[in-house]
Amino acid sequence: MAEIAKSGTPSLSSVTYMYNHLSGLIAGEAIAAGDACYIKSDGKAWKASGAAAGAAAAVYGFAAQAASVNEAVTLVYDVRIRYGANLTPGTKVFLSGTVAGGLADAATTGGTAAIGVVVDATRIHVWQARY
């Protein structure tokens, strides 16, 4: 398994953003643009983790922009994100088991189902995990 590294600051490259988002959320921790997130029982957005099966492995969406602790954050899903460099089209992506909020090219303990697919050398089409 290899981690999929971010190249620069991830950004939206899809026009469906206005329909596929969860807004009005507050960050429970510092979240970077493009991080996979879940909503914890405290109602805040936190970085998702595929290290174990459970609530933290349920990806509700991806941060549209960076947010500090207790700042507003919007999660987007079923969109294309400019994420990396030299990516291989057709590669399925999974929730990382080692980097909170990150992506990997193989299933992890908590991230057993794909949550995206690489569409070209820089963009990934991402969706929610089935929670």
Image (spheres, helix red, strand yellow):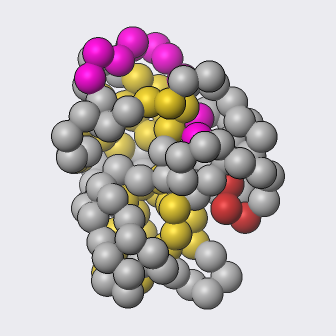
Q: In this picture, is 126 found above or below 53?
A: above
- Quarter occupied by the N terminus: top right
Residue ID at (65%, 43%): 97
Residue ID at (52%, 69%): 46
x and y percentages locating residue 58 in the rendered image: 65, 57
The image quarter in which residue 23 lies:
bottom left
Q: Is residue 88 left or right of residue 56?
A: left
Q: Is residue 25 visible?
A: no
Residue ID at (41%, 53%): 35
x and y percentages locating residue 30 in the rendered image: 38, 71
Q: Is residue 99 visible?
A: yes
- Stretch in magenta: 85-96
x and y percentages locating residue 39 in the rendered image: 57, 72
Outermost residue, front direction? 98
Q: In this picture, is 87 found above or below 123?
A: above
Q: Magenta: predominant secondary structure element? A: loop
Q: Is residue 73 left or right of residue 102?
A: left
- Quarter occupied by the C terminus: bottom right
The image quarter in which residue 38 lies:
bottom right
Q: In this picture, is 81 found above or below 19?
A: above
Count of picture labels: 0
Q: Is residue 25 magenta?
A: no
Q: In this picture, is 30 found above or below 103?
A: below
Q: Is residue 15 left or right of residue 44?
A: left
Residue ID at (44%, 40%): 126
120 or 32: nearer the eye? 32
